[in-house]
Amino acid sequence: MKTFLKRWIGLLLAVAMLAGCQPRYRPEPEPAPEPSEAKPQPVLRSEPSPPPEPEPRRLTLIAVGDLMAHWDQIEDARTPEGNYDFTHSFEPVKEDLSQGYAIGNLETVFGGEELGYSSYPRFSTPDAYGKALKEAGFDFVTTCNNHCLDRDAYGVVRTLEVLDTLGIAHTGTYATKEDSEQVTLVEAGGMKIAILAFTFSTNGIPLPKDAPWMVNMLTDEKMVSDFQKARALKPDLIVALPHMGNEYETYTRDVFLQWMDAMLYHGADLVLASHPHVLQPMMMRELTDIEGVTRQGFIIASLGNFISVQRDEPRDVGVILKVDLSQQEGQRPVIESVRFVPTWVTYKDNTGNLNIRVVPVGDALQSLEEENNPLGINPWNADRLRRANREVVSLFLGEDAVPEQVQREYVFYQRRP
């Protein structure tokens, strides 16, 4: 039995060994692909996105005309306690003035209570008027006009002291010779702005003999010299505020256009003129300036009265000018748009009491349509307000541009993309 098992096991082992010696099946290898004639495609690599353009600086420069203070305005501002408060005179335009850097022409002086207060022909106004300008949103005033010497040299110096105390920047008249030799620089919206002011008249009042530098008189020599100093400072923007023109003329004489073009040529970007007490045209100018730069400039020949009690038409009408600027890093600012808000000065309220305020024409007409008349506009002024709107729009945009429906604000210029 044992012998049989040994033989059986040996037989099985032999069969297993024979099976292990048989070759295993291997599939035939696939033929290699024929070489392609197409060139290998380059590996695409994503290029890094360029950095986004930095946002430009933006600034709205706001300008208004003559800030006057006739006797009725002083009476209107008198409080029951015997003080003065002119705040209400500018309340209706406060929102507009706060939209940018606001500039006006201060056509009075702060002579102080000791000298007393006065109106035309030689103005002296309570300091509270300056406080109201600051609260209304004015950042800057030119003190250089035909009334700047109304209280002689003392009035010039004291006016500047009041403005400095209030934090309202200024130029055109000076307390020291050193100040008169410097160009006034301000900063707004990240832009450095040089502001120059000149006047062609002091109403026959002579300059102080020991301080002829106290007022920037408009002469060729002075204009060229001041612009040369301004350009040397490399400001982003140069603004000129000349006080010149013929009173009550709604057109501009060639001699004054030549002065404004000369200021553009010598470096001004904006020329904002005053003195006629009425509005005169504005225009865009294409020019090549003294440095050979071809660029645009803007001029308005007269900003008119902003607030006064000159009631003869169109002396009761003014404008809030808004110049929108943008500036890419390393480049000169460009004018994106020029807008304007027609304004009118109220005189008396519905009860016949003085209530002297500057109001946007569109707001005044809208107030008349509302049940409670929030601005308290006299209904009999509606026709005058409509005429005022027509006067301003037709002067700046042409008669055909006067809309049937009065708008609050109009566009004079819009830069094309």
Image (spheres, rainbow, N blue to C red):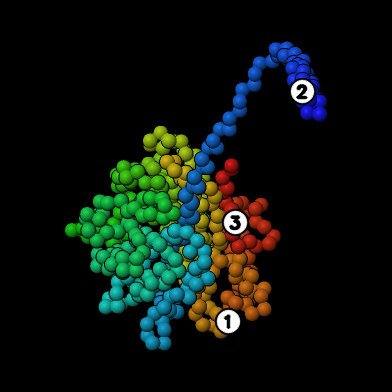
- Residue found at the far bottom of this picture: 80
Q: Residue at x 53, y 78 (%)?
A: 348
Nearer the N terminus, badge 1 or badge 3?
1
Which residue is at the front of the view, 163 or 275?
A: 163
Q: Position of residue 417 (x, y in %)?
A: 59, 42
x 60%, y 62%: residue: 408
Residue placed under numbered mark 2 in the picture: 10
User: Disc 1 residue type?
Assistant: Asn
Q: Of helix, strand and loop, which one carries label 1?
A: loop
Q: Label 1 vs label 3: CA separation?
A: 29 Å
**Residue 117 spot, x, y in % from top left:** 33, 76
Residue 103 on image: x %, y %: 42, 59
Query: Label 2 sits on what residue type?
Result: Gly
Q: Can you tell which of label 1 and label 3 is closer to the viewer? A: 3
Calculate the distance from the C-alpha at mark 2 to the C-alpha at mark 3: 116 Å
Q: Is residue 405 left or right of residue 157?
A: right
| Of residues 105 and 335, the one drawn nearer to the viewer in this rendering | 335
Question: Which residue in the structure is indicated by mark 3?
Answer: 410
Looking at marks 2 and 3 on the same chain, the residue that comes earlier in the sequence is marked by: 2
Q: Determine if residue 254 is in view.
A: no
State the residue position of label 1.
350
Picture residue at 77% right of the left edge, 20% below the top: 14
Task: Report the side of 377 relative to 214 (left or right).
Answer: right
Viewer-nearest of labels 2 and 3?
2
Residue at disc 3, secondary structure: strand
Q: Is residue 330 above or below residue 134?
A: above
Q: Label 3 is placed on what type of residue?
A: Tyr
